[in-house]
Amino acid sequence: MAQLREIKKRMGAVKTIQRITKTMQMIATAKFTAALARAKNSRPYTDTIRGLVTKVSAQAGDASHPMLEQSNRASKKDLVLVIASDRGLCGAYNSTVLRTVTKLLNEIRANGREVVVDVSGRKALAFFKYQKQEVSTRHAIGDKPQYEAVEKIGQDYIDRFVAGEFASVKVIYMRFISTSRQRPEVMQLLPLTLPKADEVAGDKVSNANFDFSPSAPELLNDLLPRSLKVSLYQAFLDAVVSENVMRMVAMKAATDNAGGLGRTLKRNFNRARQARITTELTEIVAGVEALK
């Protein structure tokens, strides 16, 4: 009797967990759909800005900009921004990002350089606290990144880089490729590295000559910071999309596993009940035989 009660109690607990994970799956699906729409809507603008910067820089000749300079950097510090999630239950999302971060930090330190860590997301903050790694700044961006907030972060990085505080600024995030594929990526924000003009998709006028008004340096002075901020914003959008799609998949797997465990428990419950009935019948028959 005690075994039957225990199995029935576990069946109830599994059903409750299944309802919870199913609800979380539905919520993650809704958030993923909204986040994917935001990421897709901003992607054409991001690509256009990058392409425009590439064309202008390719035609600007000897024009330079502090955000492009890679030499004469006296600083031995590198800044790394880690984008993780505020909540768990999203599969291997955080562990994959943090494993990539650990590898990068080890490489930087192996080269004799100092590293300053900024984080976005409570999971990354908890990880570095456990590792006894000092975190310089924690950015609270949330599930719906706002460009204004990301723009402030980007401008702060630009000012500190130009002032010579850091030799480079890198961002580690989970890049969204498709619903079945997400990849941790290390993006170098500063110094900016630009592809060649003939490498830009659809660029048929890379060899043309342009007259700039205003001048090329003035255009670069406006386009380069804008390109950096937009790229950083796109990284935050991709990270949110990846987080929600991985949570959606994880919760679906948990729901399916709960369903399978529930069926197993029900089968065990029926077997235990049948064994109990058989035992009682045997005892009754034995009692009748004893009375004869």
Image (cartoon, grey):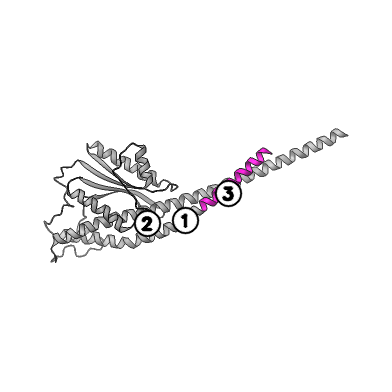
Q: What residue type is labelled 1?
A: Ile
Q: In the rendering, at what x and y percent does residue 262 appear? A: 59, 47
Label located before the other in sequence (1 or 2): 1
Labels 2 and 3: the sequence-earlier one: 3
Q: Distance between the residues labelled 2 and 3?
A: 32 Å
Using residue 108 as the reference point, say whether residue 126 is left or right of it.
right
Total marks in image:
3
Q: Residue at x 74, y 41 (%)?
A: 277
What is the x, y in percent for residue 10?
Answer: 60, 43
- Give neighbour class at mark 2: few <14, some 14-19, many 20+ (Cα, 10 Å): few
Q: What stretch is highlighted in magenta?
A: 1-22
Identify which amino acid the numbered label 2 is placed on: Lys
Q: Mark 1 points at which residue?
A: 27
Residue 48 location, quadrant:
bottom left
**Which residue lies under the disc numbered 2?**
144
Mark nearer the viewer, 1 or 2: 2
**Is residue 34 visible to us here?**
yes
Q: What element carries label 1?
A: helix
Crowding near the residue tagged with mark 3, few <14, some 14–19, many ≥20 C-alpha atoms within 10 Å: some
For label 2, the SS is loop
173, above or below 105, in the image: below
Q: Name the main secondary structure of what is drawn in magenta.
A: helix
> Could one spot residue 191 in this view of the protein?
no
Task: Check disc 3 and report its element: helix, strand or loop.
Answer: helix
- Chain-order first, disc 3 or disc 1: 3
Determine contact: label 3, label 1, CB under 8 Å.
no
- In the image as oriented, which residue stretches furthest toward the top? 290
Q: Name the residue under label 3.
A: 15
The front one of 54 and 214 is 214
Magenta span has 3? yes
